[in-house]
Image (cartoon, rainbow, N blue to C red):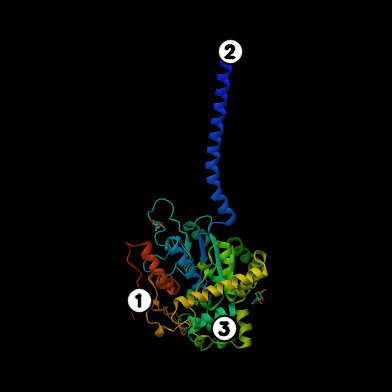
């Protein structure tokens, strides 16, 4: 009787012990899982910043300012950038992009190419080759500008380079009779003279603007690119970009880079503006289409007061940083820039402007400010040396002269 009681008591205690152990184990198990899950959950709720990015850098569209934003993000977050090989300054442009134009893409002949976080140098878009060096989850975006202003800028910048522009004194004269100057068979040097953005997306810039063809290509762009920014609405573009990439405000604040002096901007006759839309009909369709979807997306994601607030914040922060960094907030021409490393590359009849930094900056501020004003070729060379310390540095000849 006694021993039976003792037995059942022992049994009861054993069960209790087991139960307690199970609870403890379960709690421990749950605890670690809760710990594992929380940051993930929080990450998803708030969103981790996007770090795999392909920016199709179109020409004469404020894309140099976007490039600066991406270079800075790559440098400060230690991300890899897909940079041009050897002494090149762009990724094969105007030829269609190939993975082998990227430095370090094929470290050895066997095995897949190396992948990069950020790709943003000039290239002519070619998706299968881009996909060889960019991860699957890459965010694709680009920027468009009104083709009339884009062509005007292109004319000044490529005046001595594009055969179509070389022998005509003004864009008005060119647009009055473009076929007298433009030879479609002259090859790739003329890509700047007609539908240059269409060309950058990898399409035929001399194709007739037939409805079914245009629609099919617009659908191609829509399928691949998550976002097309609009240069005329640059600040709104940065607000939307920041939301999509889940970045901090400072990440998208930039000074205007590679801009021309007012002296080298020409105004076009009204009839020339209409002619430019017809001459660059493919670019005009591209721009119209994505200007509409830009505003639709912006309004879908931000209420009007939130948009106003965020644009105001961005502008205020840019002013604050300009006051902090710059000797004079007005951009300077080449001869006025005292530090020659901060002088931008000059081309055609355009005065390309840059900035002087304040003399009294402490070293941390100086580093931040330098990144914001470093012209794109110098910045590319800098990133190249950081990423490939054992390769000969890029040779920037125009800084010597
Ligand atoms: C930056 O990344 C490289 C390789 O991607 C790594 O070797 C290096 O340690 C990283 N540096 C820092 C400061 O995180
Ligand atoms: C772009 O869209 C905005 C907003 O709808 C509009 O005000 C503007 O006129 C458009 N631009 C062009 C060139 O169509």
Please name which of the two marks, 1 or 3, marks the residue nearer to the observer. 1
Residue sitting at x 42%, y 62%: 102
CA gap, disc 3 and disc 2: 110 Å
Task: Estimate how packed mark 3 is, as few (under 14), some (14 to 19) or many (20 or more) residues with alpha carbons within 10 Å.
Answer: many
The residue singled out by tag 1 in the image is 397
Residue farthest to the front, as pictured: 2
Residue 283, disc: none
**Mark closer to the chain start, 1 or 3:** 3
Using the rendered view, name the quadrant where residue 173 is placed.
bottom right
Q: Residues within 10 Å of mark 1 (few under 14, many from 20)?
A: few
Residue 208 seen in this snapshot: no
In the picture of the structure, the residue carrying the numbered disc 2 is 4
- Work out whether residue 329 can be spotted: yes
Is residue 90 or residue 38 the one in the foreground? 38
In the picture, the quarter occupied by the C terminus is bottom left
Residue drawn at x 51%, y 86% as measured from the top left: 262
Asked whether the residues under the numbered discs 2 and 1 touch, taking CB atoms below 8 Å apart as contact, a structural biologist would say: no
Q: Quadrant of ligand 2?
A: bottom right
Mark 2 neighbour density, 10 Å: few (under 14) some (14–19) many (20 or more): few
Q: Residue 389, percent across and down?
A: 33, 62
Q: CA distance from mark 1 to mark 3?
A: 34 Å
Say which label, 2 or 1, has the lower sequence index.
Answer: 2
- The residue that appears at 55% across and 37% down in the rendered structure is 27
Q: Give the mark nearer the N terminus: 3 vs 2.
A: 2
Mark 2 C-beta closer than 8 Å to ligand 1: no
Q: Where is mark 3, residue-wise?
A: 178
Q: Position of residue 354 (x, y in %)?
A: 44, 79
Where is residue 197? Give x, y as percent: 55, 72
Where's residue 144, x and y in %?
57, 72
Q: Secondary structure at mark 3?
A: helix
In this view, the residue in front, 118 or 2, is 2
Tell me, yes or no, whether the two marked residues, 1 and 3, touch with CB atoms within 8 Å: no
């Amino acid at each position: 009787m006694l021993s039976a009681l003792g037995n059942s008591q022992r049994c009861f205690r054993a069960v209790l012990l087991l139960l307690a152990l199970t609870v403890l184990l379960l709690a421990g198990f749950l605890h670690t899982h809760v710990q594992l899950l929380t940051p993930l959950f929080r990450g998803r709720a708030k969103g981790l910043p996007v770090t795999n990015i392909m920016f199709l850098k179109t020409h004469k569209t404020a894309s140099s300012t976007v490039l600066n934003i991406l270079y800075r993000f790559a440098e400060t977050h230690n991300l890899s950038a897909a940079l041009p090989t050897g002494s090149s300054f762009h990724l094969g442009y105007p030829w269609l992009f190939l993975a082998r134009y990227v430095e370090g893409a094929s470290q050895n002949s066997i095995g897949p190419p190396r992948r990069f976080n950020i790709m943003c140098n000039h290239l002519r878009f070619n998706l299968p080759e881009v996909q060889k060096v960019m991860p699957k989850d890459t965010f694709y975006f680009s920027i468009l500008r009104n083709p009339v202003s884009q062509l005007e800028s292109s004319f000044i910048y490529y005046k001595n380079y594009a055969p179509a522009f070389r022998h005509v004194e003004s864009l008005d004269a060119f647009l009055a009779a473009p076929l007298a100057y433009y030879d479609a068979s002259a090859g790739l040097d003329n890509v700047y003279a007609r539908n240059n953005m269409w060309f950058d997306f990898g399409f035929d810039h001399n194709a007739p603007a037939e409805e079914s063809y245009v629609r099919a290509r617009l659908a191609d762009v829509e399928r691949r690119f998550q976002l097309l920014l609009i240069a005329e609405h640059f600040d709104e573009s940065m607000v939307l970009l920041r939301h999509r990439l889940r970045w901090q405000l400072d990440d998208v604040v930039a000074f205007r880079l590679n801009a021309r002096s007012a002296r080298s901007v020409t105004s076009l006759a009204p009839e020339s503006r209409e002619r430019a839309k017809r001459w660059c009909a493919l670019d005009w369709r591209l721009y119209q289409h994505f200007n509409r979807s830009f505003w639709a997306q912006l309004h879908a994601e931000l209420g009007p007061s939130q948009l106003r607030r965020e644009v105001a914040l961005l502008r205020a922060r840019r002013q604050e940083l300009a006051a902090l960094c710059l000797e004079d907030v007005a951009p300077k021409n080449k001869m006025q820039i005292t530090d020659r490393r901060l002088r931008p590359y000059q081309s055609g009849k355009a005065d390309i402007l840059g900035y002087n930094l304040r003399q009294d900056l402490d070293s941390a501020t100086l580093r931040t400010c330098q990144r914001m004003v470093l012209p794109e070729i110098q910045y590319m060379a800098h990133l190249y040396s950081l990423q490939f310390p054992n390769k000969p540095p890029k040779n920037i000849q125009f800084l010597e002269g």
